[in-house]
Image: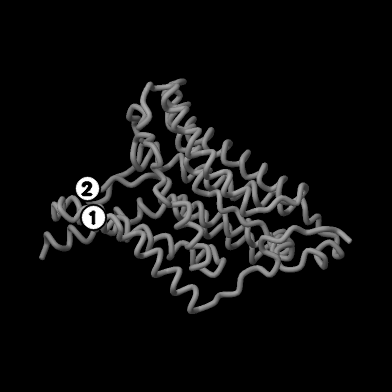
Amino acid sequence: MEVVLEDLTSLALLAASAMVPITLASIGEIASERAGIVNIGLEGIMLASAWAAVAVYILTGWGPLAGYLLGALLGLSIGVLHGVVSVYLKGDQIVTGVGLNIFSAGATVVGTYMLWGTFSNSPPVEPMPGFVIAGVRISPMVPLSLAAGVIVWLFLYRTIAGLRLRSCGEDPRSAEAMGVNVALYQVAAAGFAGLMAGLAGAYLSIDYQGVFAKNMTAGRGFIALANVAFSGWNPLAALLGGYVFGFSEALAIYLNISLEATAASNLVNTIPYIATLAAVTLVALRKPRMPAWLGRPYIKE
């Protein structure tokens, strides 16, 4: 019984580590979609930031904090660019997001080859100092991601600025009439979503896997988008959803390692994607109300 409890504890803690990238990307995207800007390029931002974080870590020797900083700045820059294209140039937000994903998938492979002479992965890096619970290393990003969900919820639902941001995603014409700078709020929200996706990518390569690998995001950006809808655009619910998706990933890892499921490893690895399909199905049945102006360019009359 003691062994089983230890295994369950390890699984729960491993799930807490696995939830971080999905949770961070989800929380940022919720703020962006509440402002009316959807970004399906989260996968691409996470991948590009994961590569940049490891590259600056190795090339400068400045450590994981420098990697996190560059990953966040790169994500912020891409997010702001997406916001500018969507708000000022009235670009199609879906097309821009698809372009981000395709560009990052190719650019990171080319960058990996140029820096390290291989198409597959970078040299390994040491993670950020963390703390150990029940023999499992926990990154400081785990409690920080939980705090981020609470802070964003407080901002959206307990501040005037949060109310104005949400009004941009519901009825930008009325928001503009009330004196809200809709374009500024939407670009800022898109930039915040990019920043959070950048942090998620840096966490993946520096803390979670300790290396950059080709296509290492493995669909986590799309899972984060599913979590946004699953949570009903609520940051606190996104914490729970992030843990559910993280648990499914941890369960796949646990089964592969503990049960030595080598023959069925491919089947076991599908658990997170099956969980995503189940969540999407649940969302379709519940039909949660999305922001009314989501994905639509706002044109002043």
| Residue 170 picture location, percent across and down | 71, 68
Which residue position holds label 2? 135
Residue at position x 78%, y 59% in the image: 298
Position of 58 compared to 296: left or right? left
| Residue 234 picture location, percent across and down | 55, 66
Residue type for callout 1: Ser
Mark 2 crowd level (few <14, some 14–19, many ≥20, 10 Å Cα): few
Measure the alpha-carbon separation of dots 1 and 2: 8 Å
Residue at position x 58%, y 44% in the image: 99
Q: Is residue 107 visible?
A: yes
Q: Nearer the viewer, residue 124 or 297?
A: 297
| Residue 250 picture location, percent across and down | 29, 55
Which residue position holds label 1? 10
The reply to whether dot 1 and dot 2 touch (C-beta < 8 Å) is: yes
Element type at marker 1? helix
Q: Quadrant of residue 244?
A: bottom left
Mark 1 crowd level (few <14, some 14–19, many ≥20, 10 Å Cα): some
| Residue 239 picture location, percent across and down | 46, 62
